[in-house]
């Protein structure tokens, strides 16, 4: 074989060997496809996990709005990149940009990683803030439970900005400043707490008092009106001292409402008296005496009309106390569970309330019957008379009587 023939054979062999080397191996191609699918599937799981996670971290914004914003920015970028290759997995391994050799998948994972790093810092910041600012956090939660923003929106908004400022101190590692400012926050928040409790419990009663004043209750029943004012003052004092003692506050609210109702009906009675002529006074007194007679008859079948009305009230009081004592002895222990006594208890309670009402009417009538120059003296007499005529409501419990109106 000449030289040219040898060269031709060598070239053919080289070409064949090159062709064999460039032929793909079927097993290696399948493995590569599987790895690609696994990577995309893993990215899908990561994306789904972060979709849920990002919805549950909104409360962390308070601790550091800046770090919270960084987490959100990285997530939005990662989500945008994921949407680019979610529908075509092969895109995940393409170059993301002509200026970078990183693939779509690599950029997605990098954004997720940056979001996670910042979120971890945010979680640690929360632990630190919760420890340092525990009193402020607890107080703010309590104000929210009272719905303070509903009653004092502007003041609550200012306080909320101050509250956020405390967390900013912690974010900047100014713990000492945070503690110092927290003291002022607590002082201001406690003040708002007291105002809110008063707004909820006392303000509606003050509105009713103003309504009574518009209806001239202060003019017709000044003593009863003054009593309401005193009770409201006491209610405000209780809230000032113990704004979370709702048992005492509820009790005082009931007492104030009682005095409001009492002042309203006393004013009506006084107005009715003023509409009477002096010739009707005797009949009015006789009506009252008649009611007292029915009470004394029901208690122990006595006629006390030969006594002054004040004495009649005193004797009836003694009769109620005696009936109560007698009934208590009879019901212990054999009748402790006898509910038939409930009716008699209610009856005697009604009797004592009736006596109290008549007493008020008598005193108001006396005021009407006297000249204007002696009204102040009559008021003093009424106050003294109230002490003598008062029939304790509790004294009526467990007494057995019958009422005949």
Image (spheres, grey):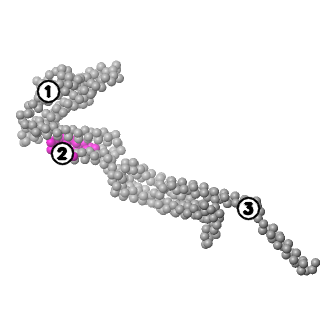
Task: Give me the residue at 33% from left, 22% from top.
Answer: 338
Residue 3 is covered by the magenta coloring:
no
Q: Image check: 196 left or right of 176?
A: left
Q: Quadrant of residue 28?
A: bottom right
* Residue at the extreme bottom: 3
Q: Which residues are magenta?
A: 211-235
Dominant secondary structure (helix, strand or loop) of the stretch shown in magenta: helix
Residue 232 is covered by the magenta coloring:
yes
Question: Which quadrant holds the N terminus?
Answer: bottom right
Residue topped by disc 1: 290
Measured in 3D between alpha carbons, the distance from the residue under mark 1 to the one under mark 2, in whole angstroms, is 31 Å
Task: Give me the residue at 15% from left, 42% from top.
Answer: 220
276 w.r.t. 329: above or below = below
Question: Which quadrant holds the C terminus?
Answer: top left
Residue density around tag 1, few if under 14, some if 14–19, many if 20 or more, within 10 Å:
some
Label number found at residue 29: 3
Q: Quadrant of residue 307?
A: top left
Q: Position of residue 368 (x, y in %)?
A: 9, 38
Q: Earlier in the sequence, mark 1 or mark 2?
A: 2
Pick the front one: 118 or 213: 213
134 w.r.t. 386: above or below = below
User: CB under 8 Å between callouts 1 and 2?
Assistant: no
Secondary element at image label 1: helix
38 w.r.t. 11: above or below = above
Q: Position of residue 94 (x, y in %)?
A: 64, 66
Secondary element at image label 3: helix
Residue topped by disc 2: 215
Measured in 3D between alpha carbons, the distance from the residue under mark 2 to the one under mark 3, in whole angstroms, is 96 Å
Residue density around tag 3, few if under 14, some if 14–19, many if 20 or more, within 10 Å:
few
Discs 1/3, front: 3
Task: Give me the residue at 64% from left, 61% from top.
Answer: 89
Label number found at residue 75: none
């Amino acid at each position: 074989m000449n030289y040219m023939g040898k060269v031709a054979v060598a070239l053919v062999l080289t070409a064949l060997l090159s062709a064999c080397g460039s032929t793909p191996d079927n097993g290696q191609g399948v493995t590569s496809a599987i790895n690609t699918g696994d990577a995309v599937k893993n990215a899908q799981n990561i994306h789904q996990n972060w979709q849920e996670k990002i919805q549950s971290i909104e409360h962390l914004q308070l601790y550091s709005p800046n770090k919270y914003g960084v987490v959100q920015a990285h997530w939005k970028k990662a989500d945008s990149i994921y949407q680019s290759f979610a529908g075509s997995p092969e895109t995940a391994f393409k170059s993301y940009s002509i200026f970078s050799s990183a693939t779509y998948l690599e950029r997605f994972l990098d954004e997720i990683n940056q979001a996670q790093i910042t979120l971890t810092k945010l979680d640690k910041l929360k632990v630190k803030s919760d420890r340092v600012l525990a009193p402020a956090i607890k107080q703010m939660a309590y104000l929210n439970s009272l719905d303070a923003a509903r009653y004092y929106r502007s003041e609550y908004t200012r306080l909320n900005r101050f509250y956020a400022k405390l967390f900013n101190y912690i974010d900047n590692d100014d713990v000492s400043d945070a503690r110092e400012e927290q003291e002022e926050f607590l002082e201001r928040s406690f003040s708002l707490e007291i105002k809110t409790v008063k707004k909820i419990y006392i303000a509606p009663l003050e509105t009713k008092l103003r309504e009574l004043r518009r209806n001239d209750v202060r003019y017709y029943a000044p003593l009863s009106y003054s009593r309401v004012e005193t009770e409201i003052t006491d209610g405000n004092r209780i809230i000032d001292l113990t704004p979370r003692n709702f048992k005492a506050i509820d009790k005082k609210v009931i007492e104030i409402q009682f005095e409001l109702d009492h002042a309203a009906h006393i004013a009506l009675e006084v107005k009715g008296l003023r509409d009477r002529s002096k010739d009707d006074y005797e009949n009015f007194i006789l009506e009252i005496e008649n009611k007292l007679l029915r009470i004394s008859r029901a208690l122990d079948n006595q006629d006390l009309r030969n006594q002054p009305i004040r004495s009649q009230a005193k004797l009836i009081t003694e009769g109620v106390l005696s009936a109560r004592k007698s009934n208590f002895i009879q019901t212990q222990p054999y009748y402790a569970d006898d509910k038939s006594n409930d009716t008699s208890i209610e009856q005697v309670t009604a009797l004592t309330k009736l006596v109290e009402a008549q007493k008020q009417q008598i005193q108001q009538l006396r005021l009407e019957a006297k000249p204007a120059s002696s009204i102040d003296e009559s008021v003093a007499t009424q106050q003294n008379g109230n002490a003598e005529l008062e029939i304790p409501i509790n004294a009526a419990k467990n007494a057995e009587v019958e009422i005949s109106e």
